[in-house]
């Protein structure tokens, strides 16, 4: 089984971190490849970033279909391009926000989300409602740390840990979902410090994708998620035509 974990931004060091998180939970017989597009934003922190990350993401899905990939993980908490990716891929495609929220819902009556910048909290709320967790998501909190600063700011771990502590106390939640793929390496440390379940969406999505393949399940192709109709695209998007 081959699972391709796609970091939709173009920062290779973040891709390496994401890959380590995914491989740590995969079955010994599963091959996990972490990749990022050649074009797009270096980090995804706005609706604009999300929109411009999607072409590169879809290019990686198309390449994966040629390489015989069994399933994909979209490793950005905004789950950008998820529906479009499901149209292109034969196997399952799992977003880390979707996976993280599903996993947290198994762990208690309610969960909180701790993410990076304040401007991204609305997207997290939108996804919680879209995925059916509007009542189970008890709060969304930001750390005011840019995505790429998670790697370089020596205070990042302490800040994220403290915000998780506050979220648990304020919301009375049973778990916290980390709202950024760049937080994947903080999960175990924060859980040890707080004694409550801390969910890394990268790890959860990897296990879910792997499990769906083992069950022989994939996205239904008889309606909305059928392959898009072939047509030419023009201008800078000409290469994306099917």
Image (tube, rainbow, N blue to C red):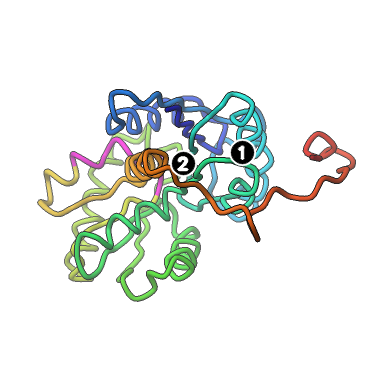
The residue under label 2 is 75
Secondary structure mostly seen in the magenta stretch: helix
User: Magenta residues, as a range?
Assistant: 180-189
Res. 226 mark:
none
Above or below, 114 against 108 in this view is above
Query: Looking at the picture, how far across and down is residue 73, in whole percent?
Result: 47, 40
Which secondary structure lies at badge 2?
loop
The residue nearer to you, when weighing 168 against 92, is 92
Q: Earlier in the sequence, mark 2 or mark 1?
A: 1
Quarter of image, res 177: bottom left
| Residue found at the very far bottom of the displayed protein | 135
Horizontal relation, residue 168 to residue 137: left or right:
left
Identify the residue shown where x is 52% and y is 27%.
35
Above or below, 118 against 33 in this view is below
The residue nearer to you, when weighing 222 against 28, is 222
Mark 1 nearby-residue class (10 Å; few <14, some 14–19, many ≥20): many
The residue under label 1 is 57
Q: In which quarter of the image is the C terminus?
A: top right
Which secondary structure lies at badge 1?
helix
**CA distance for labels 2 and 1:** 10 Å
């Amino acid at each position: 089984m081959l699972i391709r974990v796609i970091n939709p931004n173009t920062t290779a060091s973040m891709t390496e971190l994401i890959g380590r998180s995914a491989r740590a939970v995969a079955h010994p017989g599963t091959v996990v490849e972490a990749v990022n597009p050649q074009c797009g934003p270096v980090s995804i922190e706005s609706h604009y970033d999300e929109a411009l990350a999607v072409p590169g993401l879809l290019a990686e899905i198309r390449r994966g279909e040629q390489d015989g990939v069994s399933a994909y993980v979209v490793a950005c908490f905004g789950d950008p391009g998820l529906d479009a990716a499901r149209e292109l891929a034969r196997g399952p495609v799992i977003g880390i926000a979707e996976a993280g929220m599903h996993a947290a819902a198994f762990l208690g009556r309610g969960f909180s989300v701790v993410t990076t910048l304040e401007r991204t909290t609305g997207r997290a709320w939108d996804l919680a409602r879209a995925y059916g967790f509007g009542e189970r998501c008890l709060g969304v909190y930001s750390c005011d740390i840019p995505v790429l600063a998670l790697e370089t700011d020596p205070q990042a771990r302490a800040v994220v840990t403290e915000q998780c502590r506050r979220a648990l106390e304020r919301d009375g939640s049973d778990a916290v979902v980390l709202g950024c793929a760049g937080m994947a390496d903080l999960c175990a440390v924060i859980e040890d410090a707080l004694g409550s379940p801390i969910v890394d969406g990268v790890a959860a999505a990897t296990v879910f994708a792997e499990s769906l393949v083992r069950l022989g399940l994939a996205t239904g192709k008889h309606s909305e998620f059928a392959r898009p109709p072939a047509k030419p695209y023009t201008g800078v998007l000409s290469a994306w035509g099917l």
